[in-house]
Amino acid sequence: MKKQLEKIRRRNRRKMSIRKRLKASAERPRVTIFKSNKYTYLQAIDDLNGTTIASISNLEKDLKVVKNTVESIGKIGEEFGARLKKKNIQAIAFDRNGYAYHGLVKAVADGIRKAGIEF
């Protein structure tokens, strides 16, 4: 149990360090990712107003077929990029939320880039 709590503490520390360095605005919202063992969640957040602009997860009815694997999770990134395009957002600040930039996080980021959103 102590080892698990230490792991969570280290991730929260990385998360706050990353968040300090991000430059987000209304025109360039912060996109944050949260992943569990079964699902992945993405949110575009306007930090000035504290509101969520867009969100997506593979819990949604039409995205239930997308599993949490590197091969298929890029589809969520592409769909999220399309939703951002509909809201006239061309650039984002990507917040990896303390996770290492590989695997699922990288696949989602590549999917968003493929949709034409600039980081």
Image (cartoon, grey):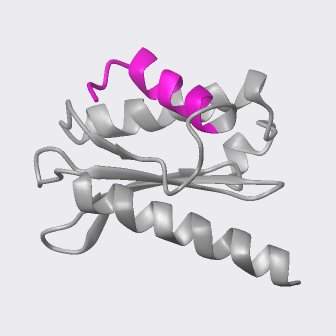
Q: Which residues are magenta?
A: 105-119
Farthest residue to the right: give it: 1
Residue at image point 23% right, 42% down: 87
Residue at image point 32% right, 60% down: 19
Residue 110: x %, y % from top left = 50, 22
Front-lying residue, 10 or 67: 10
Residue 16: x %, y % from top left = 39, 67
Query: Quadrant of residue 115 in the image?
Result: top left
* Residue 98 on the magenta segment: no
Does residue 53 appear anywhere in the picture? no
Please state, as top left, top right, bottom left or bottom right, where the C terminus lies in the image: top left
Q: How many marks?
A: 0
Residue at image point 56% right, 36% down: 101
Please state, as top left, top right, bottom left or bottom right, where the N terminus lies in the image: bottom right
Residue 43: x %, y % from top left = 43, 56
Residue at image point 79% right, 41% down: 68
Q: Is residue 21 left or right of residue 94?
A: left
Magenta residues, dominant SS class: helix
Above or below, comparing residue 57 to residue 93 in the picture: below
Above or below, comparing residue 93 to residue 2 in the picture: above
Q: Is residue 24 left or right of residue 109?
A: left
Residue 25: x %, y % from top left = 12, 54
Above or below, comparing residue 51 to residue 108 in the picture: below
